[in-house]
Image: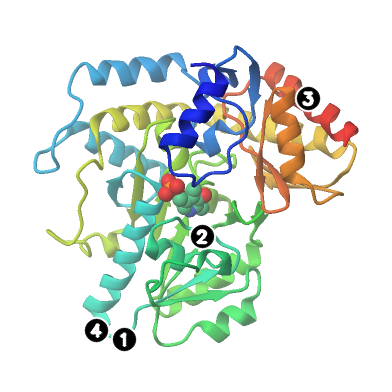
């Protein structure tokens, strides 16, 4: 199929839920992808933070294909050594104690929400079920995670939404205290709001929230679906905030391109989801676990984490010198660019045209390159971006 055929097939057979850029990717290596027509793209998106090791990394391909040829799925009615290894590695890297494996970010977040409510119900009975999330947050597309998402635009059409969420202002400790009423069982937040525009929370705010939560047995739950798995230069973003959450969720980069999510919790919560209270058919699939094990073992070494920070700093310093760039935000390889004109979508489209894949977040440009991207690919991509910015 050439691009036009793919595009018209998409029009005919797929639900029109996405505003797609005019590119069909059929092949990739490292941070370079090729379109159906042979056009080359530098990829600063990793499929929205998913392909942490880039396209078709050798070790990852080996791990996945070996596992596919060994055992591809087993029911969660039986034991799986790959689940054990994956959960153990997640615990070792996070300091958490128990893991529930699922298939996506929204599912990991649903699990966190269920843990918060049941923990509180078991201990305090009915009526203490409210979860505070941040305004401008993003937590997923299921009816409940949409309700958790603190943006009015997502609270349409699908009524009734799940009750029991209230929204607080990021970095406003007074607003948080005002909302921390007796019916609150958890606070759930991203530490760098991704879809919301690459907005980092302030250290003092996060630490004050953590302290207040601990004082009232309110769970501190961190959505690391986008920030986790070394994206920000630590394996988990909360590790540079000096806090220890009760629950951490992960997905996107965890499988390096295969669907896997995880909800991690501390010892205090380890028995909340008891037999029969939660489950999934696909969650903890051996191929997805084999992929995650390869990703985790590669991205968690001190040298790798240093390389993520250094690449991030290099990209940010280059971006600051570019025309029409007003501000550069983010940490590690999670980068937001505020441009002078309010034209992120237009810039992103022009970049695709010029051979660079780039994301937007609200009015910002957003970069989530593969963590393994080479400096050569970085320079190629940045020079395309520079040309596009100069022309607009
Ligand atoms: C992408 C994202 C989600 C949703 O993940 P899915 O895998 O699309 O369900 C949830 N939270 C954050 C912070 C995200 O970036």
CA separation, marks 3 and 2? 39 Å
**Local SS, label 2:** loop
Question: Where does the C terminus fall, quadrant-wise?
Answer: top right
Height in image: 316 above or below 60?
A: below
CA separation, marks 3 and 1? 55 Å
Contact check, label 1 and label 4, Cβ < 8 Å: yes
Q: Report which residue position mark 3 lands on.
A: 384
Instruction: Please state the horizontal and vertical placement of residue 213, each as a whole percent of the image.
Output: 46, 74
The yes-or-no answer for disc 1 within 8 Å of ligand 1 is no
Question: Viewed as shown, does residue 183 lie left or right of 316?
Answer: left
Q: Report which residue position mark 4 lands on.
A: 125
- Mark 3 and mark 2 lie on one chain; the one further toward the N terminus is 2
Q: Report which residue position mark 2 lands on.
A: 243
| Residue 12 quadrant | top left
The yes-or-no answer for disc 2 within 8 Å of ligand 1 is no
Question: Viewed as shown, does residue 233 lie left or right of 103?
Answer: right
In this rendering, the label closer to the viewer, 3 or 1: 3
- Mark 4 and mark 3 lie on one chain; the one further toward the N terminus is 4
Q: How many labels does the image show?
A: 4
CA separation, marks 4 and 3? 58 Å
**Local SS, label 3:** helix
CA separation, marks 1 and 4? 7 Å
- Mark 4 and mark 2 lie on one chain; the one further toward the N terminus is 4
């Amino acid at each position: 199929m050439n691009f036009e055929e793919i595009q018209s097939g998409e029009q005919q057979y797929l639900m029109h839920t996405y505003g797609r850029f005019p590119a069909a990717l059929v092949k990739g290596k490292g941070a370079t992808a090729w379109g159906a027509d042979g056009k080359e793209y530098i990829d600063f998106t990793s499929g929205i933070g998913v392909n942490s090791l880039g396209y078709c990394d050798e070790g990852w391909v080996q791990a996945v294909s070996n596992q596919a040829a060994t055992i591809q799925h087993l029911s969660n009615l039986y034991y799986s050594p790959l689940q054990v290894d994956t959960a153990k590695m997640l615990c070792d890297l996070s300091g958490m104690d128990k893991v529930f494996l699922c298939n996506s970010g929204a599912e990991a977040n649903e699990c966190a929400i269920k843990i918060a409510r049941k923990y509180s119900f078991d201990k305090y009975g009915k009526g203490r079920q409210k979860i505070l999330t941040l305004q401008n947050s993003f937590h997923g597309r299921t009816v409940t995670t949409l309700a958790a998402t603190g943006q009015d635009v997502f609270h349409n059409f699908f009524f009734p939404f799940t009750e029991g969420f209230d929204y607080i202002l990021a970095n406003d400790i007074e607003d948080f205290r005002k909302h921390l009423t007796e019916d609150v069982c958890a606070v759930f937040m991203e530490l760098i709001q991704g879809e919301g525009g690459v907005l980092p929370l302030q250290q003092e705010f996060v630490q004050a929230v953590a302290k207040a939560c601990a004082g009232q047995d309110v769970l501190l739950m961190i959505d690391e679906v986008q920030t986790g798995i070394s994206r920000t230069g630590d394996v988990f973003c909360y590790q540079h905030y000096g806090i220890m959450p009760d629950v951490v969720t992960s997905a996107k980069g965890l499988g390096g391109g295969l669907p896997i999510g995880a909800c991690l919790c501390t010892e205090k919560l380890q028995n909340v989801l008891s037999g029969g209270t939660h489950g999934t058919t696909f969650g903890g699939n051996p191929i997805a676990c084999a992929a995650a094990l390869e990703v985790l073992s590669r991205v968690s070494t001190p040298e790798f984490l240093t390389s993520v920070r250094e690449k991030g700093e290099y990209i940010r310093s280059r971006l600051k010198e570019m025309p029409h760039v007003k501000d550069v935000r983010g940490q590690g390889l999670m980068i937001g660019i505020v441009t002078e004109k309010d034209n992120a979508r237009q810039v992103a489209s022009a970049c695709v045209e010029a051979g660079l894949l780039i994301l937007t977040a609200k009015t910002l440009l957003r970069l989530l390159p593969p963590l393994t991207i080479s400096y050569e690919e970085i320079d190629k991509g940045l020079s395309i971006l520079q040309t596009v910015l100069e022309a607009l």
